[in-house]
Image: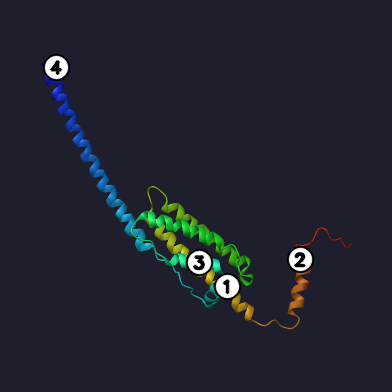
Amino acid sequence: MKYNITIFFFIIFILFSCKNDNQKRIAENRKEIKKREIIFKNIEKGWDFYDTPITEASEKSIATWNELRMFLAELAQKPKKTIGAFQKKSKELSKKAMALNENIPLEFSKPQVKSRISTLITKVRLLELFIHLDNIPDKKVSQLVAEINLELVSLQRQMDKIVEKSKIPVEEGESDLLKMMDTTRAIPNTPIDPNLPRVE
């Protein structure tokens, strides 16, 4: 009989302890859900990209530079509903940003533009990294969106500068001077074919 009473109290003790554990878990789950909702709202509010060209040069280049057009189109589509949608979008943005290095129009295939593209790619990849963390730093994600916008503006303004410089007419003799400067450099801009005989 004593044995049955001991078992009975033991079972009651286990039931009450399980109930307390369940209540703690439910409270922790509610806190986690609220935290994720706040993070989602902050990311949704901060996810505002400059998806339209701001300069005449970038507007014209969209017609010929397919990768830039696709990147800006991807920026224009804002994800909705879940953090997972933002994570998928960041992965797509990263792919489109990486593609910007391919098929750069000849007039923009300059170190100034390439360096800005590289910086833009780095920022987009960082965004993808931070948004895929278990504990998402929502303030850092919003900051990266702002930095990506600044890099986009910088890229487009550089493209505009290149177009404006190309409109300046070359003065008489300037092209000859540039050619002479190029040949007097220790490392010329034009590649040298190692199979050609050397003139000494």
Which label's residue is closer to the chain start, 1 or 3? 1
Q: CA distance from mark 2 to mark 1?
A: 34 Å
* Circle 4/circle 3 CB separation < 8 Å: no
Question: Around disc 3, counting alpha carbons within 10 Å, would you say few (fewer than 14), some (14 to 19), or many (20 or more)?
Answer: some
Residue behind mark 4: 3
Q: CA distance from mark 1 to mark 3?
A: 11 Å
Q: CA distance from mark 3 to mark 2?
A: 40 Å
Q: CA distance from mark 4 to mark 3?
A: 76 Å
Which label's residue is closer to the chain start, 2 or 1? 1
Quadrant the N terminus occupies: top left
- As shown in the figure, which amino acid type bears the numbered disc 1? Thr
* Circle 1/circle 3 CB separation < 8 Å: no
Q: Name above or below for residue 124 compared with residue 160.
A: above
Q: Secondary structure at mark 2?
A: loop
Residue behind mark 2: 185
Which label's residue is closer to the chain start, 4 or 2? 4
Residue behind mark 3: 70
Which label's residue is closer to the chain start, 4 or 1? 4
Question: Around disc 1, counting alpha carbons within 10 Å, would you say few (fewer than 14), some (14 to 19), or many (20 or more)?
Answer: few
Residue behind mark 1: 64
Question: Around disc 2, counting alpha carbons within 10 Å, would you say few (fewer than 14), some (14 to 19), or many (20 or more)?
Answer: few
Q: Secondary structure at mark 3?
A: helix
Q: Residue at x 26, y 44 (%)?
A: 28
